[in-house]
Image (cartoon, rainbow, N blue to C red):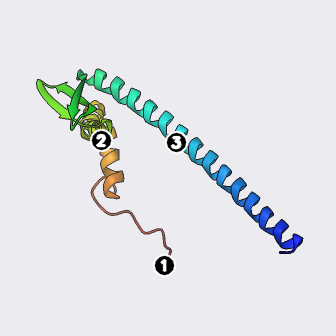
Amino acid sequence: MTSSSKKKRQQRAQSLQALARERQRQRELRQQTLALRAEKRWSNTLRQLDMLGAQVQTQEQMVDGISQTFYAVTYEGQVHQFPTRSRLQRWFKPKRKRQEEEQMSWAERHVQWMIDNNCDDHGNPWPSDELD
């Protein structure tokens, strides 16, 4: 083997290692960002649940020899159980929307209805943006 081909092979291996290290660093940064975002979302959810008057309890349970956290939410006299935070957040989203709509004035609800249905005050569709 010639020395030039050996050098090329070594350079290729070094660049592949550097690329792998960079990808690993980016992966770790993404995971940190996702973890921070999830914690922020969870704290917002807890705060909003508290505003609605719901109470959240965490319960540790053994499932197949593995300790898992379950979330029990007491809301309007009913207890709802969720295996994950994301399930709890998915369940909570329509409740939060309903509460926001109840707090809106009639005019705000009407404007939201017009936006959702893409029409004017009387239910007529908006004119096309295209000029004929």
Q: Residue furthest front?
A: 1
Q: Position of residue 8 (x, y in %)?
A: 82, 68
> According to the image, label 1 marks what residue?
132
User: Which amino acid lies under the numbered mark 3 shown in the image of this protein?
Assistant: Gln
Residue at mark 3 to residue at mark 1: CA–CA distance: 51 Å
> According to the image, label 3 marks what residue?
31
The numbered mark at residue 109 is 2
Q: Residue furthest bottom?
A: 132
1 vs 2, front mark: 2
Residue at mark 1 to residue at mark 2: CA–CA distance: 33 Å
62, above or below 118, in the image: above
Front residue (pair 23, 99):
23
118, above or below 104, in the image: below
* Residue at 75% across, 59% down: 15
User: Which amino acid lies under the numbered mark 1 shown in the image of this protein?
Assistant: Asp
Q: Are marks 3 and 2 in contact (CB under 8 Å)?
A: no
Disc 1 element: loop
* Residue at 31% across, 35% down: 85
* Residue at 34% across, 25% down: 46
Q: Which is more N-terminal, label 2 or label 1?
A: 2
Q: Which is more N-terminal, label 2 or label 3?
A: 3
